Image (tube, grey):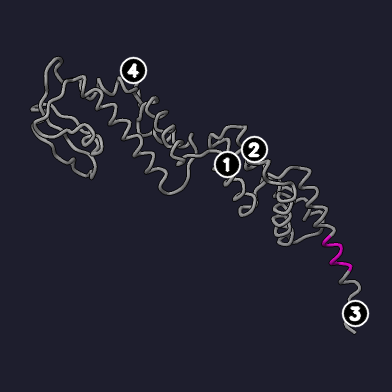
Amino acid sequence: MVIQLNPEPEEQEEQALAAFPEGELLEITRVERQKKSDHRYIIHFGTYNLTVHEDVMIKYRMISGRSFTKADLEEIVVADERQRGYVEGLRYLERKPRTAMELTRRLRQKEIGETIIAEVIQRLQEERLIDDPLYAKQWTEQRIMNQRKGKMWIRQELREKGIDKTIISEALEEITPEQELESALQTGRKKWNMIRGDATDKRRKTGAFLMRRGYSGEMVRQVLNTLRQEEDYEGEEEDFYDPD
């Protein structure tokens, strides 16, 4: 047996309205707030009922005494699913920015249909609440400058977040080689100074550390050469130090 976790709008209609009679005017007999939910309401049509978001209820004027056909309610169910997806999207974006793919995965977990997900993503993009190019740019800057990660590491992270390859490349291109080298140098210098041992040991351990953080082999070599020169220079100062 196959279980569909994110049915399409037509299937949502069938599931929600399966028991509703065809070809009849269905009058709303009662409206009540759903327990444990501030924004959803149960709409009663005699022995039948369905739940909708408050915004949908207001939009379609679902108040006691008004009548709807099953076809009307099918439209309302789709509108409610669309609103539910949008609200879930906003809730997921409350704490921090997300990529389009991250939000898509989240809505799938909430069993939102694929067609509705696409509509929600498009709406949030139009409202600039989802902006993959801006996300990639800010993520890259933060990881380079604050987290001291290399471009190879950042590229992989953004891929996992579903960012398009072209957008990733554009974001990485905004970081100059000098900026990345400075980030690698600061990271490498801190690691180098923590290692107890001779220069060969420091070079080996610092190089491996920088590679794990996503810096290229060429950049790691530049950093290690600089650090070795700095240490040799400090050693020369110590040799020529004369307290008298």
Amino acid at circle 3? Asp
- Residue 140 position, x and y percent, is 61, 45
Residue 170 image label: 2
Q: Nearer the viewer, residue 208 or 149?
A: 149
User: What whole-number distance in Å separates the C-alpha atoms at marks 4 and 2?
Assistant: 45 Å
- Residue 23 position, x and y percent, is 14, 14
- Residue 204 position, x and y percent, is 77, 50
Whether residues under marks 2 and 1 lie with C-beta atoms below 8 angstroms apart, the answer is yes
Height in image: 155 above or below 239?
A: above
Q: Nearer the viewer, residue 114 or 127?
A: 127
Residue displayed at 37% across by 43% down: 91
Please name which of the two marks, 1 or 4, marks the residue nearer to the observer.
1
Height in image: 93 above or below 244?
A: above
Amino acid at circle 4? Met
Residue displayed at 87% across by 70% down: 237
The quadrant the C terminus occupies is bottom right
Amino acid at circle 1? Ala
Q: Which residue is mark 1?
A: 136
Q: Earlier in the sequence, mark 4 or mark 2?
A: 4
Residue 1 image label: 4
Residue displayed at 21% across by 24% down: 73
Q: Which residue is mark 3?
A: 242
Q: Earlier in the sequence, mark 3 or mark 1?
A: 1
